[in-house]
């Protein structure tokens, strides 16, 4: 089941999912901060952006337990002047925790945030993915996303 975020009952579940997402990304890019170290600050930033620019969080629930979430913003802030300004939306997060993947929850979450973006009047929907995250990239391409911007990095020892 996919449902809206409920701050009274979902705060800890959202935190757990944020940690899980970050640890998945760290498995691909070890220089990223640890999930526990960044989860609270990241969630505060997410809620601040939703308050400033509009957006929604959708929770994936299975068997009465939250097993994933997706967040979408309906505008971009002035700190990102080089981005498509409007009418566009950005999926900032999408995660299904290990053990619950491959059951269509990621696709369902993506469909929910796309519908929210359409209701908000967005004409494009954007999402970022680490280049090494082949599973996520495959999901996004199957949902109709195409490569738009490639950010590259070089490790300096």
Image: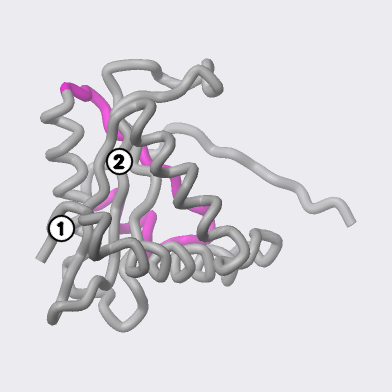
31 is higher (above) or lower (below) than 93: below
Residue depicted at 12% across the width and 39% down the height: 115
Q: Is mark 1 on a helix, strand or loop?
A: helix
130 or 54: which is nearer to us?
Answer: 54
Query: On residue 95, which mark appears?
Result: none
Question: What residue would you read off at disc 2?
Answer: 72
150 or 79: which is nearer to us?
Answer: 79
110 or 10: which is nearer to us?
Answer: 10
Q: Say whether residue 132 is magenta.
A: yes
Segment colored magenta: 121-142
Q: Say whether residue 61 is magenta.
A: no
30 or 148: which is nearer to us?
Answer: 30
Residue depicted at 24% across the width and 65% down the height: 9
Residue 25: percent from left, percent from top:
53, 63
User: Which residue is outermost to the right?
Assistant: 157
Residue 52: percent from left, percent from top:
38, 27
Q: In the image, is 112 to the left or to the right of 69?
A: left
Q: In the image, is 137 to the left or to the right of 81?
A: left
Question: What residue would you read off at disc 1?
Answer: 108
């Amino acid at each position: 089941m996919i449902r809206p975020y409920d701050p009274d009952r979902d705060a800890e579940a959202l935190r757990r999912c944020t940690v899980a997402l970050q640890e998945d990304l760290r498995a691909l890019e070890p220089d990223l901060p640890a999930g526990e170290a960044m989860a609270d600050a990241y969630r505060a930033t997410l809620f601040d952006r939703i308050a400033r620019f509009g957006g929604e969080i959708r929770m994936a629930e299975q068997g009465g337990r939250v097993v994933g979430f997706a967040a979408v913003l309906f505008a971009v802030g002035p700190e990102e002047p080089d981005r498509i300004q409007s009418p566009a939306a950005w999926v900032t997060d999408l995660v299904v925790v290990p053990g619950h993947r491959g059951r269509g929850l990621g696709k369902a979450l993506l469909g929910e945030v796309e519908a929210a973006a359409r209701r908000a009047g967005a004409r494009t929907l954007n999402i970022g993915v680490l280049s090494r995250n082949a599973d996520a990239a495959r999901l996004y391409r199957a949902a109709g996303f195409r490569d738009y911007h490639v950010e590259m990095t070089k490790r300096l020892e």
